[in-house]
Amino acid sequence: VTSDGVSLRAVFGCFPTGVTAVGAVVDDQPVGMAVSSFTSVSLDPPLVSACVAKTSTTWQTLRSARWLGVSILAANHGTICRQLAAADPAGRFTDVSWDVTDGGAVRIRSASAWFECELEREISVGDHFIAILRIVSHLADPTVEPLVFHRSSFRRLLAS
Ligand SMILES: Cc1cc2nc3c(=O)[nH]c(=O)nc-3n(C[C@H](O)[C@H](O)[C@H](O)COP(=O)(O)O)c2cc1C
């Protein structure tokens, strides 16, 4: 079956993922976006990746930040996630509890886990950049249930 962008997006959506919030403080303001394309890449050196649309204006700002925070959103962060994907970036952090590191990386409070990263490399592939991020510090609370994104809906894990 040949594919157009809309139907391909629907097929990609059959693959469930977690959702992260990638964020940094830039010019004294928190900047961030929801990213579900997060993947672990390497243990040594410690690397993760994210695919960001070349059209993303938020990424253009984030890529200039020295340190980036990557928060793995919790099951009850659905509203925060939608907010962090809003077309207008102005209200993305309204009513969101977050902290910032000395280096400017943003951590969403009560996230399942969090990485502080440095942008190591950006690879241009198709209509996205693969951002390779080097982990400089990390935190996890394995008791916090993660948010799951599947077919445009938020879900949670169920023990089988
Ligand atoms: C659940 C979810 C996952 C997303 N994952 C990605 C992603 O992996 N890469 C990406 O570039 N945008 C992703 N987005 C879209 C961005 O969060 C955001 O909508 C977009 O960056 C807004 O455009 P701007 O960067 O020009 O402000 C996702 C949105 C949602 C709701």
Image (cartoon, rainbow, N blue to C red):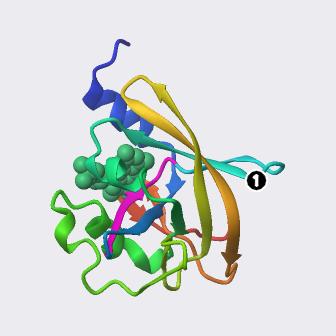
- The residue positioned 29% from the left and 44% from the top of the image is 56
Instruction: Please determine whether, in this image, residue 6 is positioned above or below residue 79.
Output: above
Secondary structure found at label 1: loop
Q: Badge 1: few (under 14), some or many (20 or more) residues near its Cα, within 10 Å?
A: some
- The residue positioned 26% from the left and 71% from the top of the image is 92
Q: Is residue 35 left or right of residue 132?
A: left
Q: Is residue 34 inside the magenta stretch?
A: yes
Q: Is residue 56 left or right of residue 124?
A: left
Q: What residue is disc 1 on? A: 46
Residue 76 position in % (x across, y down): 43, 80
Q: Main secondary structure of the magenta part?
A: strand
Which corner quadrant of the image does residue 11 belong to? top left
- The residue positioned 55% from the left and 79% from the top of the image is 102
Q: From this viewpoint, which residue is outermost toward the top?
A: 2
For the residue pair 109 and 77, the one nearer the viewer reads as 109
For the residue pair 4 and 20, the one nearer the viewer reads as 20
Residue 153 position in % (x across, y down): 35, 59
Taking the image as drawn, is residue 151 in sight?
no
Q: Which residues are magenta?
A: 29-37
Taking the image as drawn, is residue 36 in sight?
yes
Q: Which quadrant is the C terminus positioned in?
A: bottom right
Q: Is residue 82 left or right of residue 148?
A: left
Residue 152 position in % (x across, y down): 33, 52
Residue 3 position in % (x across, y down): 33, 18
Instruction: Please determine whether, in this image, residue 5 is positioned above or below residue 84.
Output: above
Q: Is residue 142 left or right of residue 147?
A: right
Q: Which quadrant is the N terminus positioned in?
A: top left
Which corner quadrant of the image does residue 101 belong to? bottom right
Amino acid marked by disc 1: Pro
Q: Is residue 10 inside the magenta stretch?
A: no
